Amino acid sequence: MPKLSKHFESCQFEPSISTLQWFTCLFAYNFQFEVLQKLWDVIFIKGTKMLFSITLAIFDLLEPKLLECESIQEIVRIMDALPTFITDIDKLPIYCSQLKYKVSN
């Protein structure tokens, strides 16, 4: 996601601001339990590398909205409101399993 990466740099946003919390809490702070069940199933069945695949899928799904942001504050606001922007959670595990999100060891 080169466009998103450049945009993050121009807004001085470091993705680890959000991803650190996602990884340490296994997304528990950001999603409701019904969603967590699906995400955790994928993580526990396919392994911890799915954390990265899910994260890439989230950034890809949010890319159009994130590219509209003009400041780090706006980006953080979107990251904090993550569940409101990802509404079709049934597709997220399928989406993150697509070939472009494969993460190797």
Image (cartoon, rainbow, N blue to C red):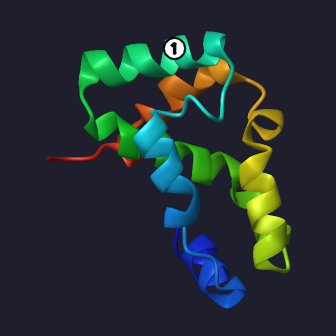
Q: Name the residue at the left extreme.
A: 105
State which quadrant residue 58 falls in.
top right
**Disc 1 residue type (three-letter):** Lys
The total number of labels drawn is 1
> Where in the figure is residue 46, as x and y percent of width and height?
26, 23
Residue occupying the point 75% across, 76% down: 72
> Where in the figure is residue 100, as x and y percent of width and height?
40, 47
Task: Please state which of residues 95 and 30 is positioned toward the viewer in this rendering.
Answer: 30
Residue occupying the point 75% across, 49% down: 80
Q: Which residue is mark 1?
A: 38
Q: Is residue 23 left or right of residue 44?
A: right
Residue occupying the point 79% across, 54% down: 78
> Where in the figure is residue 101, as x and y percent of width and height?
39, 45
Task: Please state which of residues 33 and 39 is positioned toward the viewer in this rendering.
Answer: 33
Residue occupying the point 74% across, 63% down: 76
Q: Is residue 17 left or right of residue 48?
A: right
State which quadrant residue 6 falls in.
bottom right
> Where in the figure is residue 2, as x and y percent of width and height?
52, 75
Q: Name the residue at the bottom extreme.
A: 10
Task: Tell me: residue 42, above or below residue 72.
Answer: above
Neighbor class of circle 1 (other Cα within 10 Å; few <14, some 14-19, many 20+) is some
Name the secondary structure under disc 1: helix
Task: Please state which of residues 14 and 100 is positioned toward the viewer in this rendering.
Answer: 14
Task: Tell me: residue 92, above or below residue 104.
Answer: above
